[in-house]
Image (spheres, helix red, strand yellow):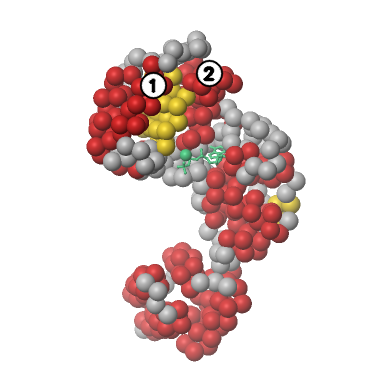
Amino acid sequence: MTASPGRNTTAPATRQWPTSAVNKGKGKPKPPPATADGAAGDHLPWVEKYRPASLSDLVAHEDMTNTIIKFIDEKRLPHLLFYGPPGTGKTSTILACARRLYGPQYKSMILELNASDDRGIDVVREQIKNFASTRKIFSSGFKLIVLDEADAMTTAAQAALRRIIEKYTKNVRFCIICNYVSKIILALQSRCTRFRFNPLEPDQVERRLDFICRLEGVDLRPDGMQALLRLSQGDMRRALNVAQSTFAAFGTVDEAAVYSTTGTPLPRDVERCTDWLMNEDMTTAIVHMASLRVDKGYALADLLGDMFLFLARMEMPDPAKIVVYEALAEIEYNLSLGCSEAIQAGALAAAFRLAVELASK
Ligand SMILES: Nc1ncnc2c1ncn2[C@@H]1O[C@H](COP(=O)(O)OP(=O)(O)OP(=O)(O)O)[C@@H](O)[C@H]1O
Ligand SMILES: [Mg+2]
C-alpha cells in the first residue's frame, strides 16, 4: 500500500461567522441523521452522547469523508494524518471509520494511543507490537492504530515511529491525529495521506445544534443560536458544551444566558463601551465603564478582544486606528502581567481621546 504524500483536502469556506449578535431571516435547515447513542445516556455530556456514529452522520468535510469511504470500500486504506483545530471531528471521523471497517466489534480491532501520555516510545512500541501481532478475528485485512495528539510527541519519538510504521504496514494502518501539522516531522507526513479539518461552517454547526437541541427539548432562541455560533467559531465541541451548560443553568438558551454562562461580554455592551470612549469626556467614559464592569462582572481583558473586532469594522482614519490598536495591544499585555484594571482602563480612555483628536484634525 502506498500513501499519497502531501495530499491535502479542504472544504471551501462559504459563509461568514457572525460578528454581531443579530442574524435575521434564516430558514430552518434539515436535521442531520441520528447518532450512535440516541436518547440513551442522559448522564453523558452531549459531545459524547451525540458523537457521530457513522461517517455519514458527520455534518462537515463531505469531500474528505467520501474519499475515506472510497478507500475503505475498495480496501485500500492508506495511513492517515488528520490535522486541524479542536472540535472539528478528527477523533469522531476515525472512530466512525473503524465502525465502518469492523462493525460493532470495532473496539477489539483498534488501538487508541494518546501520544501526549507520559509514556516513552519504548512502551508505545511494545503496545503496538503486542497489538499488531495478535491474530485478527475479522475478515478485514488490517487493524487500526490511532495516535491521538501526536504533535505532543518528541521529535525522537516521531523518528522512532517511522520504522514502526514501516515494519507493521502489512497488517496495521496508522492514523496520526494532531492540531498542528507543522509539529509532525516530514518523514511521518510523507508516509500518510493528509486530511485537513477546517473549522466547521456556521450553517453546519447550526444544523447540528438545532437537531440536538430539539432532541433534548431545549428552548433555543434565535439570538441564543447566534451567540453560540459566534462564541464557538467552528468548534463543534465548544458549541455543544456551552449550549448544554447554558441549558442546565438557565433552562432557556438565549443570548443573555449564553454570554452570562461563559462570562463573555455581550456585543451590545462592547458597543456601549466603545461609544462612551469615543463620544464622552474621559472621566465620564471611565466611570461608565467601571460601573458596567462591576454590574456585569466583566474583566477589562475580555472587553478588549471584542472591542478590537468592533473597531476593525468602524470607519476611522488610519493614524487614529493605529493609536487605539497599539494601546489595546499594550493594555492586554499589561493586564496579563497583573497590572491594575483601573489604571489600564484610564490608559484605554486616554488612547481613545488621542485617537478622536487625531481623527478630527
Ligand atoms: N463534523 C462533525 N459533525 C458532527 N458532530 C461533530 C463534528 N465535529 C465534531 N463534532 C462534535 O464535537 C465533538 C468533538 O469532536 P472530536 O472529538 O471529533 O473533535 P477533534 O477534532 O478530535 O478535536 P481535538 O483536536 O480537540 O481532539 C464530537 O463528540 C461531536 O459531538
Ligand atoms: Mg480528538
The extreme top residue here reads 139
Q: Nearer the viewer, residue 98 or 259?
A: 98
Give the quadrant of the N terminus.
top left
- In the picture, the disc for residue 252 is none
- The image shows residue 359, relative to residue 265, as above or below, that is below
Q: Nearer the viewer, residue 169 or 43?
A: 43
Give the quadrant of the C terminus.
bottom left
Q: Looking at the picture, which amino acid does disc 2 mark? A: Tyr
Q: Nearer the viewer, residue 130 or 232?
A: 130
Element class at badge 2: helix
Q: Looking at the picture, which amino acid does disc 1 mark? A: Asn
- The image shows residue 76, relative to residue 128, as above or below, that is above
* Residue 352 visible in the displayed image: no
Element class at badge 1: helix
Question: Badge 1: few (under 14), some or many (20 or more) residues near its Cα, within 10 Å?
Answer: few
Residue occupying the point 72% across, 44% down: 216
Indicate the quadrant where residue 3 lies.
top left
Q: Position of residue 206 (x, y in %)?
A: 61, 45
Q: Position of residue 10 (x, y in %)?
A: 42, 36
Q: Nearer the viewer, mark 1 or mark 2?
A: 1
Q: Which residue is mark 2?
A: 102
- Is label 1 in contact with label 2 (beta carbons under 8 Å)? no
* Residue 128 visible in the displayed image: yes
Q: Which residue is mark 1?
A: 130
Residue occupying the point 73% across, 49% down: 218
Q: Position of residue 321 (x, y in %)?
A: 38, 72
